[in-house]
Amino acid sequence: MSIDADKIIALDKKHVWHHLTQHKAFENADPIVFVEGKGMRVTDIKGKEYLDAVSGGVWTVNVGYGRKEIVDAVSEQMMKLCYFAGSFGNIPTALFSEKLIEKMPGLSRVYISNSGSEANEKAFKIVRQISALKYDGKKSKILYRARDYHGTTITTLSACGQEERRMQYGPFTPGFIEFPAANPYRNPYGMDPSDPALGQKFADELEKVIMAEGPDTVGGVIVEPITAGGGVLEPPQDYLKIVSALCKKHNILLILDEVVCGLGRTGAWFGYQHYGIVPDMVTMAKGVASGYAAISCTVTTEAVFNDFIAAPSDREAYFRDISTFGGCTSGPAAALANIKIIEDEKLIDNVNAMGAYLMDGLRGLMKKYDFIGDVRGKGLFCGLELVKDRTTKVPADEATCNQVAGHCMKNGVIIGKTSRSFKEYNNTICLSPALISTKKEIDEIVTALDNAFAEVKI
Ligand SMILES: Cc1ncc(COP(=O)(O)O)c(C=O)c1O
């Protein structure tokens, strides 16, 4: 079928409402319409090819485009049985759950839905229902961290540490309380960002909030292992261990949002596994099936699951939640094939090797450009924070990041950036190339950034 590019663009402009987009801009410009992808490269409808350094724009297509193994697994499964409601079992869900749990020692139950937001909503509902079942409804508060993001629904925005994402969407769901970010580069104590004592300092901030709210009223704490859209913030090494111990001490469920970090992105199967903890719940979405099907998971320990075991005649004590499309078998079929690729191609080893190579390249750029204030990340998940002055750390304007991203895009490399999340700190360039990256692609990304930085005016 030949494609009439002008027609498709006209139809897009007339009928499609793009995500996170001010459409006024399309009065004088065309939207980019992507047509195909192979490996780490995508092509738009006008025939221009791009190297994708952000895995589908939002850290999702982790194993790259055009994976026949996943397409075949989905197609075969869909011919056999495309769907049945999740109150019943199906074969790919059983097989995928076993495989996933094999990667998550200490956890044992997989609840499937469709998006990261939904997976986090399930975790919040589990906290609220356990509060009702065991604590007379008193342990219902959920604490979230500044700069973290957990989704786009009103309740996940109620747990959002990014003020510009929340703006205009209130009133919010009650019972969600913010605690301070774990941001070594901008720590408020004047300490060196690499000071190991920072882990305890940041965790103390959480304990202060728990004590102020009353531990008997707090049922859950949610954090990203490494904050993604909030600026790729990696906590000090012992931070999560201290947070986990605090949660245990106060009988609070710890939820790790692995929507971005999960399935290999950081050089381990899950981000939390770098820090020697086992959370009570883990949520995941984007990389679960690398975007080949919509699937998210809320994974829990057997102890959490057991809180919902009661006599079948009990009308309240089971998890009274449903997700229509959580019953689509394409999700687990794609996810199983996705994990097989990560295993067979030893992609986690590759993430560690290529992540180190990327970090070297970025550190080289930092030596060259003094407006790069910080380079950080883990695995193939990196951020460069741009500043007006390295000593004062005054953040660069959002427009600077836009300029850098625009320059790269024009030259055929798609990079990411913090975008309208904060009033002040939309100053981080984000990179999350696919787990299949080779030195060739990493070099291209670093060169594109170098060329862009040479042109930007801070
Ligand atoms: C850490 C994190 N959690 C949750 C979400 C929400 O996922 P979704 O957009 O699939 O609802 C996102 C999306 O970017 C995310 O980055």
Image (spheres, rainbow, N blue to C red):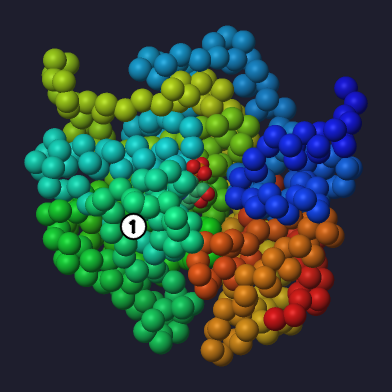
The quadrant where residue 79 appears: top right
Q: Is residue 404 left or right of residue 7?
A: left
Q: Position of residue 253 (x, y in %)?
A: 25, 49
Q: Position of residue 249 (x, y in %)?
A: 17, 58
Residue at coordinates 30% horizontally, 48% vertically from top-left? 173
The quadrant where residue 245 appears: bottom left
Q: Is residue 153 above or below residue 404?
A: above
View extreme (bottom): residue: 391
Residue at coordinates 68% horizontally, 79% vertically from top-left? 366
Q: Is residue 296 left or right of residue 210?
A: right
What quarter of the picture does the N terminus occupy?
Answer: top right
Choose between 83 and 203: the one closer to the eye: 83
Choose between 280 and 327: the one closer to the eye: 327
Sort mark 1 into few (<14), some (14-19) or many (20+) by Cα contacts within 10 Å.
Answer: many
Q: Is residue 457 visible?
A: yes
What quarter of the picture does the C terminus occupy?
Answer: bottom right
The quadrant where residue 106 appears: top left
Local SS, label 1: strand
Residue at coordinates 65% horizontally, 18% vertically from top-left? 75
Q: Is residue 299 above or below residue 396?
A: above
Number of numbered callouts drawn: 1
Residue at coordinates 45% horizontally, 84% vertically from top-left? 192
Q: Name the kind of residue labelled 1 in the image.
A: Tyr
Q: Position of residue 346 (x, y in %)?
A: 62, 44
Q: Is residue 104 visible?
A: no
Q: Is residue 193 left or right of residue 396?
A: left
Q: Position of residue 263 (x, y in %)?
A: 52, 44
Note whether ligand 1 is within 8 Å of mark 1. Answer: no
Q: Is residue 10 left or right of residue 363?
A: right
Q: Which residue is mark 1?
A: 144
View extreme (top): residue: 80
